[in-house]
Amino acid sequence: MAIQIDREATPSQQSRIENQSMASIDEETAVRKNPVDDDLDAVRKLHSKYGSKFVPVRSSQFPTCEVFLCGTIHVSNFSTRMVEDAIQSLCPRVVVIELCPDRAESLGVDENPSQSITLAEVVSVAWKDRNIVTLGTGMLMWMQGKAARLLGNKLGGELHAAAKEAHKVGAMVVLGDRLYDVSIQRIFDKLGLLEKLKAAVFMVWEVLTMSLSGMRDYISKSDKDDDFVQDEIQRFTKYFPGLSDIIISERDEYLAQSILEVMRELSLQ
């Protein structure tokens, strides 16, 4: 049994993980089914409580393994509660989280440094390094930290909760995401000048217009309305197709392969 803790996941993203990434091994591998009877009551309760953000997945290639995808948002208390509830209820053997080794230290601290970093510090470090990748990485971390501060939440709270609850139930924690710096580098290597400029303008606009009421409204809609999340992803993909391919599609593929590796290992035990 494994639980994948994913970022801002939606049913369509989860379906892509099933139907595309798993198909890279066997085109008929990914099949969504009900889990075994022993866990059926717990799964029904979780699905009833969290809806399509909690998705059971089965693979015909690894029939002894069960996977439960938890679609989360990094600054949402709702996501943190769902992760805690799922792990406590299902007691999985493995918990795969959307985090890379370079960011693993954030799981062991109560306060995330990216929540207190200032925009001036981000610009200063990027200028000192003369590295636009450093600037892009810092800006993204700063924006996420600001969102968390506005909401009074812990940035990546669901990731911290997943690691903590996994330890309580004796589950192994697997860091399943691609290296953060690799994703950022891919953005700067792959995007054309126009899309880079559009992304830069978008980030500046988000920085200038980010507000408490706006963030609360966005998180509330994301937690409760799957159609809203799907519409936002489609809108983002429409205006930033290259960026969407790198930070959503490619990382979905990477995470799916991480899950497959776990399933393969578990099936051999």
Image (cartoon, rainbow, N blue to C red):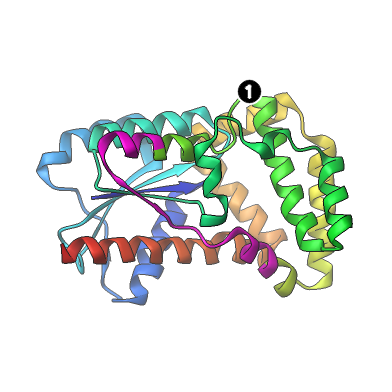
Q: Is residue 82 left or right of residue 160?
A: left
Residue found at the far left of this picture? 37
What segment is highlighted magenta in the picture? 164-186
Does residue 32 belong to the magenta stretch? no
> Can the viewer see residue 47 in this picture?
no
Q: Nearer the viewer, residue 182 or 232?
A: 182
- Mark 1, other Cα within 10 Å: few <14 / some 14–19 / many ≥20: few
Q: Is residue 191 left or right of residue 52?
A: right
Residue 240 vs 213, above or below: the answer is: below
Residue 37 vs 200, above or below: the answer is: above
Residue 73 appears at what percent x and percent y? 53, 40
| Identity of the residue drawn at 33% across and 46% down | 55
Callout 1: helix, strand or loop?
loop
> Can the viewer see residue 12 in this picture?
yes
Q: Quadrant of the C terminus?
A: bottom left
Q: Nearer the viewer, residue 229 or 88?
A: 88
Residue 264 appears at what percent x and percent y? 25, 67
Amino acid beneath label 1: Gly
Residue 203 appears at what percent x and percent y? 79, 49
Residue occupied by mark 1: 152
Residue 261 vs 73, above or below: the answer is: below
| Identity of the residue drawn at 34% across and 73% down | 23
Does residue 179 belong to the magenta stretch? yes
Residue 116 vs 205, above or below: the answer is: above
Q: Is residue 179 left or right of residue 141?
A: left
